[in-house]
Image: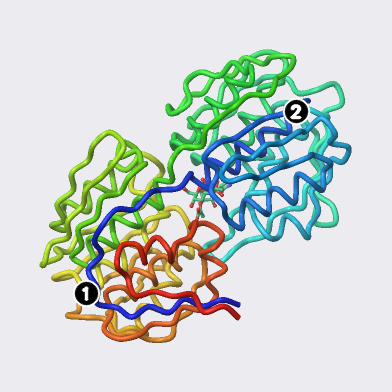
Amino acid sequence: MDKIQINGGRQLKGEVLISGAKNAALPLIASSILVDGVSTFENVPRLMDISSIQMLLEDLGALCEFKGHTFTVNASGIDKIEAEYELVRKMRASILVLGPLVARFGRAKVSMPGGCAIGARPVNMHLSGLEALGATISIAGGYIEATAKGGLTGNEIYFDIPTVTGTENLMMAAVLAKGQTKLRNAAREPEIVCLADALNRMGANITGAGTPIIIIEGVSRLHGANCRVIPDRIETGTFMVAAAATMGDVLIRDCIPDHLGGVINKLRATGAIVDAFEDRIHIKGSEIIKNIDIKTLPYPGFPTDMQAQFMALMTIAQGNSVIHESIFENRFIHANELLRMGADIKISGGNIANVRGVSHLQGAPVMASDLRASASLVIAALIAQGTTVISRVYHMDRGYESIEKKFEGLGADIKRISS
Ligand code: EPU
């Protein structure tokens, strides 16, 4: 297993280009199942999670080609409706094939995703939504089986909690359903809007994406289209925090600052100077990092996927910061690793972290537990005195394209130790 070694203490300076968003690319690629033809997706990041969904689609019988950052799927040959355990267990987002398979083939069998390092992550709302569209659901032998012999029928679906992949799954299921589907209390993330735009390019009729009410008028078939993946707002935010934490001066290009309102606002509150333009952000870190409080919320609130990175920044802020994780029940595992680097963090009630700023962190061997936790450890290592070796970086490779090369380009002393 590869490791990342970082000698901390360097200010980040220069320019960095942002890749396409993993969490937008995955549903787009899954949506290709709906089309008896060829779909092309541009700006797809080269990541392990993309390889996982490629393997899954190929196992179903689709033909995939991934050249540069262009991903093409010919889904005409799909002759299998079962997403197997061995493929789904590598990536929870594989659940995204459930809606499209039932919509196109009237049947799907998908291994039930288990919990993961950040929480239990149930899929009950995906399943009750499909039932509302007329599918019969059963769970046996660790698999979800969904059947809708005569096809799905539009209906009103209310989500108890806005769920990102749940909204995506049901939007994809509803595009080929008979009649109208209304999704209420839908997730509003930019990735939802990206998927709705792509589906509309394929011939779907979706309005309201990006608001809590999405209306889908079913159509009889979709056709292939060329769609573009939006820039990764979490990768953008990660570089912003790294720049602020190292008192750096970084121009972040090919991003959409509009998707980062909560993050920009909080970084400014720490004292960083953030200038946002249409497709780029210039950030300069300040010598004194002010303490701030954060509560993670569904978009447009502060993203849970940026919580770990902000915790790393708050370890060297002046005073105390309170971080409230309200989306996932177990998303503070990185705190224990940050303690090993000299941070002062106390967790109370399971989802509140009290971070008392210290004068500096020290390098140490640490272990990544999930994707965003690994980004937080990289940021901590960049500011720490001495050398940090981060193991289990396969978590990071799931979601950050060429991360060590990008940080190296900004002047970080970082290298991958391959095993
Ligand atoms: N939830 C339920 N039942 C469901 C679905 C969700 O109770 O049927 C709960 C979850 O347990 C959680 C909350 O609803 O407490 C919101 O979860 P959501 O369904 O929105 O999460 P997700 O769709 O599984 C996506 C991203 C995550 C990101 C979350 C929250 C993808 C592929 N994954 O997950 O990304 O943290 O939304 O924004 O889009 C990451 O990239 O590192 C990552 C974990």
Tell me if 119 is positioned left or right of 259 in this view.
Answer: right
Mark 2: C-beta under 8 Å from nearest atom of ligand 1:
no
Residue 119 is marked as none
Where the C terminus falls, by quadrant? bottom right
Against 155, is 40 above or below?
Answer: below
- Percent x, y of residue 285: 17, 60
Image quadrant assignment for residue 202: top right
Q: Residue at x 60, y 25 (%)?
A: 199
Tell me if 334 is positioned left or right of 356 in this view.
Answer: right
Image quadrant assignment for residue 231: top left
Residue to which mark 2 is pinned: 103
Q: Which residue is drawn at 80% across and 49% down?
A: 139
Tell me the kind of residue under disc 2. Answer: Ala
Against 94, is 81 above or below?
Answer: above
Q: Which residue is drawn at 45% across and 68% down?
A: 374
Residue 356 is marked as 1
- Percent x, y of residue 326: 40, 54
Q: Earlier in the sequence, mark 2 or mark 1?
A: 2
Tell me if 71 is positioned left or right of 320 in this view.
Answer: right
Of residues 131 and 310, the one nearer the viewer is 310
Mark 1: C-beta under 8 Å from nearest atom of ligand 1:
no
- Percent x, y of residue 230: 46, 37
For mark 1, give the secondary structure.
strand
Q: Distance between the residues labelled 2 and 1?
A: 51 Å
Q: Which of marks 2 and 1 is in front?
A: 2
Against 122, is 278 above or below?
Answer: above
